[in-house]
Image (cartoon, rainbow, N blue to C red):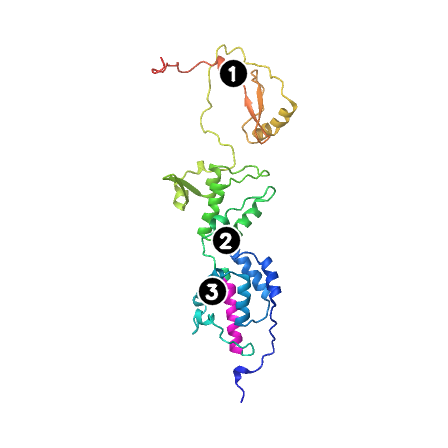
Amino acid sequence: MANPEQRPIGDVSVPLNTGDVREFKKEMGRLLEDPLGVAERLDQFLGPNIYTWVELQSILGILFTMEEREMIRHSGMRVWDRECQGPDQGDQKWPMQDPGWNNQNERHRQNMSDLRWMIIRGIREAVPKGQNIRKALSEHQGKDEPLADWLERLRKALQLYSGVDPDTAAGQIELDKKFGLNDLVLIPEADNNLLGRDLIIALGIKITPCEGKLKIYSLTEEDNFEISDTVWYTGEVGKLNIQPISIEIQNPEIPIRVKQYPISLEGRKGLKPVVENSVHQGVLESCVSPHNTPILPVKKPDGSYRLVQDLRAVNQRTITRFPGVAKPDTS
């Protein structure tokens, strides 16, 4: 009577040749740099076939160093013991010596399938988590790369190199560090950019110097209640809720009127969006006045302009509210 475990199975295993494996190694990637990618590519390369213990060990021997194979084996056994409930332990499912599995034996084929699963999972988790956070956050935004695309690359790199889920609290803190302490995000097409303090407030974090080092903390709900709404960034120009400041001038019956000196065409074009934006935000208002002071366009390093008002004539005729007192140490 035939042994039921030895009954023929219709599937036929197609072994890989050494040349195919060596050619695949050129495209596989490096385990320490991209464990998730290596696992995914190897899984696709192996295809739907079932491989014997000898074949799998031969493939691993070509693709990985001895140290890497040890890392993969220990990681795979650890995953098996953690996730698979059964009588067999990880070291039994991944034996050191050839167990003599026969691919025509149903139970043996299951062992081969389990070993392949352990190899792929072992590769995914072979690199210690948290080891490569610095590499994960070393990505920089491309010159013309949209912010959303860069953030998505950061999220993938964080999970790829460190094993940290970007959707968890720990992952959010790491991403906040990247945006808050490393790269200030500048979006040319945005109406209002988040820079410096505004960026930190928008991210909901606070930075505290401690013994020459910076520590970053997330703001809590209690902080939101304790902080006045008037100090949060709103994207609008801040205005003081006080009475306008008035000054007294000498000979008030004579207007302070200084003729505008010539401004280059480039300067006028540079100041146009600045003035229009100030009018739009309510900082400047159109009016008719006998007074006039000249303005000066100052070019910034990035090519844009800022408006500077020449108030020297006003300062000369301003009546000082409090008399100046000589400093004792200089008199």
Mark 1 Cα shell of 10 Å, populated few (<14), some (14-19), many (≥20): few
Type of the residue with mark 1: Arg
Magenta-colored stretch includes residue 113:
yes
What secondary structure is marked by label 3?
helix
Q: Is residue 159 above or below residue 310?
A: below
Magenta range: 106-122
Q: Nearer the viewer, mark 1 or mark 3?
A: 3
Kindly identify which residue carries mark 2. 161
Residue that extends furthest to the left in the rendered view of this protein: 328
Q: Is residue 42 left or right of residue 210?
A: right
Q: Say the numbered circle drawn on residue 191.
A: none
Q: Is residue 125 visible?
A: no
Kindly identify which residue carries mark 3. 73
Characterize the magenta stretch by its predominant secondary structure.
helix
Kindly identify which residue carries mark 1. 312
Please give the name of the residue rendered at 49% of the width and 15% of the height, measured from the top-left corner: 315
Residue that extends furthest to the right in the rendered view of this protein: 265
Q: Position of residue 314 (x, y in %)?
A: 51, 15
Contact between labelled residues 2 and 1, with CB atoms less than 8 Å apart:
no
Work out whether residue 148 or residue 10 is closer to the camera in this orientation and state it: 10
Q: Position of residue 17 (x, y in %)?
A: 61, 68
Q: Is residue 41 visible?
A: yes
Type of the residue with mark 2: Tyr
